[in-house]
Image: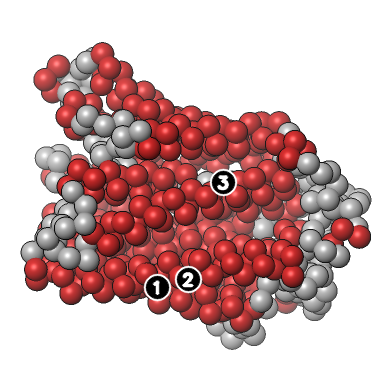
């Protein structure tokens, strides 16, 4: 980083590998997470490429059925548990939350570092399980297949996810205590940036929901090893109990992924339209509403399991209800854009892409919440497409948008804007070409998780695979030009976007202590309408 070293900052305050591995600085820990989740994203992406290449032809002539099962299982496990869940909270959240609230660090810096080590240990455990035989249960570990029928590495993989779960719990606890106890003077709850509100709601889910998954995976291991008869009907267990427990965590887990993404989008939309966010209080409280309602809708994943019609109707009704706070956010972002002075910089392009993809994903979620339609499309590619539009399209677009937005603050360098805009366009086009045909495939009846299929589905699968190739290029480009910018990019000013927020009042990159003197907050968040915010 030539030229940046003239001023002491968190990057050059200490040198050597050990200074990073033993750091308690939230910003350095965020960088450690950034490197870790990028590696896991690349590994998960390679498994996805193998799956899409297999589906290029209907005969299943690239991978055997068993290998294909392992490929999509490992893709799902790595992407869900080791990329989508930690990507935004562990990287951007770790880096930004203390600065956004005017604090020097998180409340428990050592526990923050411990969280990263737990993530790495969990990831290594899971990768070891995968290279020594893999797992074929899908990322859902449905019983009784996972407890009795599968002869793959179910237990080691579950142990890796179990360890990683503690990383998320500790991070959530750290965020909650930090936001409650360490806000700068004058920073009331309703002056908090919406990014912080989103992470507060996410942390509640992490702390309350993740232990349920951890306990469930322990029960799977016990059942598999000692035949306890918890889930296996042959021993007096109930396989549906596993689905209830799994989805009680895993549906709220969707919001662990998408709520931080929504926080990022709120920051981007208000900055690049130069307006205060429309309906700030509604956007803030809708995050909490999503976190609470998310715990009440798990059984809409189980409409075809034989549950009672009356129970299904109740869960269908509540599932429609959780769409309301999500819609509040989309409507308020749209109202913020209305008559705004919009700048189509790369972060804003990603934000607009997020709104488009999340809207499609959210509306198709209403199809799946509808009993009759859900029965028709259950376990088809319609579900795959919906799932990816919300979780992958939404989370990754926001992650990339946020990474570009705060990249000058993180590294002290600017990236080539034209390449960033091209990349945002390629990602958006590639994503839609990959997953929109899958809505049609699912509607026409192609089941998910099959490695051979009738010839009539090939054209749509070829389109999907072609889209995946374009999407791969779109994901690779930021890796190249952001890496290039770390050495050759122009020096970044403290506030290159003219944004509001305490993090922009520190130099780029920030000093280890974040602020020379503790800041005092005297105005609401996003005060673009009150005074002119200058770039620099």
- Which residue is rendered at x = 11% and y = 20% of the image? 234
x, y (%) of residue 302? Answer: 21, 44
Residue of label 1? 470
Quadrant of res 462? bottom left
Cβ–Cβ under 8 Å for marks 1 and 2: yes
Q: CA distance from mark 1 to mark 2?
A: 6 Å
Q: Give the camera-side residue of 361 and 403.
A: 403
- Which residue is rendered at x = 31% and y = 56% of the image? 50
Residue of label 2? 474
Quadrant of res 246? top left
Residue 275 visible in the picture = no
How is the model colour-coded? secondary structure
As drawn, 147 above or below 265: above
As drawn, 342 above or below 411: below
Q: Give the camera-side residue of 339 and 145.
A: 145
- Going from the N terminus, do you reach mark 1 or mark 3 first? 3
Q: Is residue 9 left or right of residue 391?
A: right
Cβ–Cβ under 8 Å for marks 2 and 3: no
x, y (%) of residue 301? Answer: 25, 47
Neighbourhood count class around disc 2 (C-alpha, 10 Å): few under 14, some 14–19, many 20 upward: many
- Which residue is rendered at x = 50% and y = 54% of the image? 259
Q: Is residue 530 left or right of residue 195?
A: right
As drawn, 336 above or below 163: below
Quadrant of res 470? bottom left
In the rendering, which numbered label is found on residue 36? 3
x, y (%) of residue 74? Answer: 34, 44
Residue 264 visible in the picture = yes
- Total marks placed: 3
């Amino acid at each position: 980083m030539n030229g940046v070293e003239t001023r002491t900052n968190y990057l050059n305050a200490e040198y050597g590998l050990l200074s990073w591995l033993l750091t308690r600085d939230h910003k350095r820990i965020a960088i450690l997470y950034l490197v870790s989740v990028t590696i896991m994203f690349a590994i998960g992406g390679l498994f996805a490429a193998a799956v899409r290449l297999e589906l290029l032809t209907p005969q299943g002539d690239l991978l055997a059925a068993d290998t294909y099962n392992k490929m999509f299982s490992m893709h799902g496990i790595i992407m869900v548990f080791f990329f989508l869940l930690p990507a935004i909270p562990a990287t951007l959240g770790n880096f930004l939350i203390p600065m956004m609230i005017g604090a020097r660090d998180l409340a428990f810096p050592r526990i923050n570092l411990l969280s990263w080590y737990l993530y790495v240990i969990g990831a290594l455990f899971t990768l070891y399980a995968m290279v020594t035989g893999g797992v074929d249960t899908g990322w859902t570990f449905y019983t009784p297949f996972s407890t009795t029928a599968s002869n793959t590495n179910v237990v080691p993989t579950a142990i890796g996810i179990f360890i990683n779960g503690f990383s998320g719990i500790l991070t959530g606890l750290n965020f909650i205590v930090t936001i409650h106890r360490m806000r700068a003077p004058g920073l009331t709850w309703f002056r908090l940036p919406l990014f912080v509100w989103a992470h507060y709601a996410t942390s509640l889910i992490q702390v309350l929901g993740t232990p349920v998954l951890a306990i469930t995976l322990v029960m799977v291991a016990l059942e598999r090893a000692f035949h306890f008869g918890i889930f296996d009907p042959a021993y007096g267990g109930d396989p549906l109990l596993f689905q209830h427990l799994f989805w009680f965590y895993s549906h709220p887990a969707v919001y662990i992924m998408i709520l931080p993404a929504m926080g990022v989008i709120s920051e981007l939309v208000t900055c690049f339209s130069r307006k205060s966010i429309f309906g700030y209080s509604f956007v803030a409280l809708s995050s909490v509403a999503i976190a609470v309602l998310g715990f009440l809708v798990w059984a809409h994943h189980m409409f075809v399991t034989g549950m009672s019609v009356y129970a299904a109707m109740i869960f269908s009704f509540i599932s429609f209800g959780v769409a309301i706070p999500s819609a509040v956010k989309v409507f308020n972002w749209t109202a913020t854009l209305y008559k705004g002075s919009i700048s189509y910089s790369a972060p804003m392009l990603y934000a607009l892409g997020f709104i488009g993809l999340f809207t499609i994903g959210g509306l198709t979620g209403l199809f799946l919440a509808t009993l009759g339609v859900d029965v028709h499309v259950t376990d088809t590619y319609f579900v795959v497409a919906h799932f990816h539009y919300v979780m992958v399209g939404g989370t990754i677009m926001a992650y990339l948008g946020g990474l570009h937005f705060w990249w000058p603050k993180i590294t002290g360098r600017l990236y080539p804007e034209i390449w960033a805009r091209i990349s945002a366009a390629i990602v958006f086009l590639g994503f839609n070409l990959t997953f929109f045909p899958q809505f049609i495939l699912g509607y026409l009846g192609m089941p998910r998780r099959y490695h051979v299929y009738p010839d009539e589905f090939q054209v749509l699968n070829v389109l999907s695979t072609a889209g995946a190739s374009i999407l791969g290029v779109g994901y690779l480009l930021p890796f190249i030009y952001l890496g290039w910018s770390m050495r050759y990019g122009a020096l970044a000013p403290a506030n290159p976007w003219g944004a509001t927020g305490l993090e922009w009042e520190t130099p780029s990159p920030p000093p280890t202590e974040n602020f020379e003197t503790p800041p005092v907050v005297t105005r609401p968040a996003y005060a673009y309408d009150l005074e002119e915010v200058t770039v620099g």
